[in-house]
Structures are given as C-alpha cells and as structure tokens.
Image (cartoon, rainbow, N blue to C red):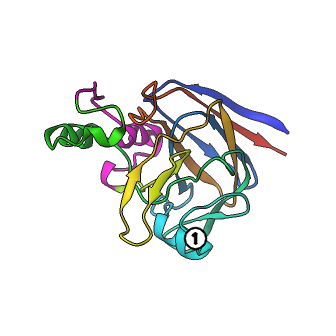
C-alpha cells in the first residue's frame, strides 16, 4: 500500500486530515484515541455512536463492523483490529475535556481514574483536541461528534447498566485500520488518559491507499 500521510501526534493533542473513499487510516497507539469522522461534502453528516451500535447490533465493534452516520450511511469499515482479544473499543463515553476533569476533582471523583484523588489533571482533553483536529472545516465545538474511543476498554455491569473506567490498555503500540466508505474529514485525539500509568502517550496516524 502507498503511504499518503504519516503523522506523529504528541500526547494530549489533536490531529485531522481529509480522506478519499477507499483509503485506509491506521491509528497506532498504546493509549486511548478519541476518533470521529464527518462527510467531507456534507459537514452536517457526522459519525453517530447510536446508529453505529444499532446497525451493528452490538455495543462493541471490531473487524468487519462499520461506523455509521446520523443519516444512516456507512462511513468507515474496521478492516483490522489488533486490540481484538485484549479489550473492546468504547461506544458509550463522550470525550474527556478540561471542564470534565475539573468537575471530577470538585466532586471528589478523580479516583475513578485509578490513580487516587490527588493527581495532576490536564487543562484540556479529547474534546478540545477534536476541535483542533476539525479546525480546517470550522466545525462548531458543540457539533463535534461523540467519538469512537479506540483502545478504551470499559467495564459494563449488564444488570445495573453501570459503566466503569478500566486500566486495560495495550502493553505495546498496536493499530486499528479503518477504510473510508465515503470522502471524509477525520480527526483523532491522543488522550491524556488518566487511567493509564503514564497519563497518556503519543499516537501515529497513517493514511494509505491500495
């Protein structure tokens, strides 16, 4: 495959690029990556967590599953998933953000991130990073889609519905490949990831064409 883009994305920063239908995006990391996509020719058509769960009839997606838009169109297909067997990508949570971390500290809930109540918190998070990633297309902050949280394994109690953070992360960098099913604007965030021992890591974003 021919490499079109190969970008290093530092920890707790955002990345964005355009993609043509049929191209493949490889996200490589050992930390959470918040990811979203938008129809390049209709910026009102955006990735949708709920449609993605309904069309795939599952709350966790992997190889062969598709990301859907709110207009019920397939946007991307997962064609390889090296996290399979280690954990699941999350479709429940939204994006972390500076205000979310600040509120968690005020409410005494930082221990949900597995490092206790007195830990350093970032002044921004994945929501702000996705805003930066989509900045070329001037997407308003309130219209940034809730993401596919790649490598964010969460524990779900099927009886109560309670969702809990998990420290389950890849030990070494691994990747997920997603094929574009339409021309897209894509964005990813290298999460500050307070549930990880290193509080987040850089990621690699590579676009290929066959």
Residue pointed to by mark 1: 58
Residue 62 placement (x, y as % from top left): 66, 58
Q: Is residue 87 above or below residue 51?
A: above
Q: Is residue 187 above or below residue 180?
A: above
Q: Nearer the viewer, residue 154 or 128?
A: 154
Residue 195 placement (x, y as % from top left): 41, 36
Q: Is residue 152 above or below residue 204?
A: below
Residue 1 placement (x, y as % from top left): 85, 39
Instruction: Describe residue 31's horizontal placement relative to residue 12 as left or right.
Output: right
Q: Magenta span covers which residues?
A: 118-142
Instruction: Describe residue 41's horizontal placement relative to residue 145 as left or right.
Output: right
Q: Nearer the viewer, residue 74 or 197?
A: 197
Q: Nearer the viewer, residue 42 or 164?
A: 164
Q: Nearer the viewer, residue 153 or 122?
A: 153
- Residue drawn at (34%, 31%) of the image: 115
Instruction: Describe residue 26's horizontal placement relative to residue 120 as left or right.
Output: right
- Residue drawn at (44%, 61%) of the image: 156
Q: Is residue 35 magenta?
A: no
Residue 114 placement (x, y as % from top left): 36, 37
Which residue occupies the extreme left position in the image?
106
Secondary structure beneath dot 1 equals loop
| Quarter where residue 174 is shown | top right
Instruction: Describe residue 170's horizontal placement relative to residue 188 as left or right.
Output: right
- Residue drawn at (58%, 53%) of the image: 88
| Quarter where residue 106 is shown | top left
Q: Is residue 138 magenta?
A: yes
């Amino acid at each position: 495959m021919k490499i079109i883009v190969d970008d290093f994305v530092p920890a707790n920063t955002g990345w964005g690029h355009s993609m043509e239908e049929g191209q493949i995006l490889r996200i490589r990391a050992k930390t959470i990556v918040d990811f979203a996509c938008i129809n390049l020719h209709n910026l009102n058509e955006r990735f949708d967590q709920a449609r993605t769960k309904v069309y795939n009839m599952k709350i966790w997606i992997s190889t062969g599953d598709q990301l859907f838009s709110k207009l019920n169109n397939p946007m991307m297909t997962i064609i390889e998933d090296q996290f399979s067997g280690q954990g699941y990508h999350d479709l429940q949570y939204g994006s972390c953000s500076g205000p979310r971390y600040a509120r968690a500290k005020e409410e005494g809930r930082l221990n949900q991130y597995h490092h206790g109540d007195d830990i350093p918190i970032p002044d921004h998070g994945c929501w702000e990073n996705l805003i930066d990633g989509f900045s070329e297309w001037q997407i308003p902050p309130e219209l940034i889609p809730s993401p596919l949280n790649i490598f964010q394994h969460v524990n779900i109690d099927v009886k109560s519905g309670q969702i809990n953070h998990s420290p389950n992360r890849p030990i070494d960098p691994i990747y997920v490949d997603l094929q574009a099913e339409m021309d897209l604007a894509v964005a990813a965030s290298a999460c500050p990831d307070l549930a990880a021992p290193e509080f987040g890591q850089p990621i690699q974003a590579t676009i290929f064409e066959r």
